[in-house]
Amino acid sequence: MTGIRASAGLMAALGLACAFAWHIAVGPKVIPLGTVADAFLSYDDMVFDHVVVRELRLPRALMAVAVGAALSVAGALMQGVTRNPLADPGLLGLLAGASFAVVLGAFTGLSGPAAIPALAALGALGAAVIVWSLASAVPGGATPMTLVLAGAAVTAFLAALTAILLLLDEMSFDSLRVWLTGSLTGQPGQAGVWAAAWLLLGLVVALGAARQVTALAMGDDAATGLGVDVRQLRLAILLSVVALTAAAVALAGPMAFVGLVIPHIVRLIVGHDYRVIVPGAALAGAIFMLLADIAARMLLAPVEISTGLITALLGAPFFIWLVRARL
């Protein structure tokens, strides 16, 4: 099993390198891989292709890697801690909460680089608390089905509030309309630096808690018997999931189904040890997002569609299959 995991890790790392290089090379103008390499090894700001690679395509590729890794790790943690195969930042309302908070912040004038990921974190946390409270209040408690239903209700409500804010000032929020579909077209700038800090925080906590998440996935009693402080662990995972979701939303808006699909694929390959699942989900999520963004740019070229639409088109059939298989 160790050899299989090592081979899978090596293949994932190579796949990420290939997807990253391909992502930078393709676009409205295809740039040869040799020119891509030259843009890093011997950059010349007088060469147009070098400028395109360094100033436009490299930041976008890095955003795709960050967003894919963040949402995939967040989904893996949520599924492990709740023992809910349908747990995902999108399905449980965190993406909608983060998006609404960012739009509300822009509406009230709180839209600085540092404020965007902080607002997204507050929105994700608020939505998570509301969804869990609603699901726990019904007979039978917070089951996978009640959590998904509560998440759908909260998502619809927050989406309606977000639409109202956008309609109140259509001119000012025109750029946010594209962002709300899940887009990697924007330049991260200073907001990207702050989002990277939130991403780093979430990943550090996730990696540190991975062993205990494996124990918790077997049940609260089993985890307690192994010396795990279940309450403290859940709080740590909540912090990690909120931070990762905030970073992803701050960079690219809500990307649906990434956190649902990738963890299940990773578990099929590496098993149920979260010390392997967490880094595996980060690698696989980054690859998935790079490929989805390539598809968004190339399927209807020269017209570009939002990457979030591609992830939804790929993830929705998987969600339907998962519901039929598990519930």
Image: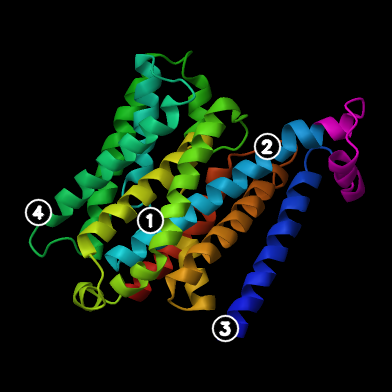
Mark pair 3, 2: CA separation: 35 Å
Q: Is residue 26 above or below residue 110?
A: below
Marks 1/2: CA distance? 26 Å
Label 2: how many residues lie within 10 Å, few (<14), some (14-19) or many (20+)? many
Earlier residue among tags 1 and 3: 3
Q: Which residues are magenta?
A: 32-51
Among the 4 quarters of the image, the one containing residue 86: bottom left
Location of mark 2 (residue): 59
Which residue corresponds to the image point at 69% horizontal and 48% vertical from the top-left?
Answer: 294
**Residue on which disc 3 sits:** 2
Q: CA distance from mark 4 to mark 1?
A: 20 Å
Front residue of this view, candidates 93 and 122: 122
In this view, the residue farthest toward the bottom is: 1
**Disc 4 crowd, CA 10 A, few/some/many (<14, 14-19, 20+):** few
Mark 1, residue position: 88
Q: Residue at coordinates 30% horizontally, 64% vertically from top-left?
A: 81
Q: Kindly identify the amino acid type of the residue bearing the numbered disc 3.
A: Thr
Kindly identify which residue carries mark 4. Answer: 137
Circle 3 sits in a helix, a strand or a loop, which is it? helix
Please provide percent x and percent y for residue 72.
Answer: 48, 57
What distance separates the C-alpha of mark 2 from that of mark 4? 44 Å
Q: Amino acid at mark 4?
A: Ala
Q: Main secondary structure of the magenta part?
A: helix
Q: Residues within 10 Å of mark 1 (few under 14, many from 20)?
A: many
| Viewer can see residue 31 | no
Give how far apart the Cα atoms at labels 3 and 4 are: 43 Å
Residue at 22% in and 64% down: 230
Is 220 displayed left or right of 162 in the figure?
left
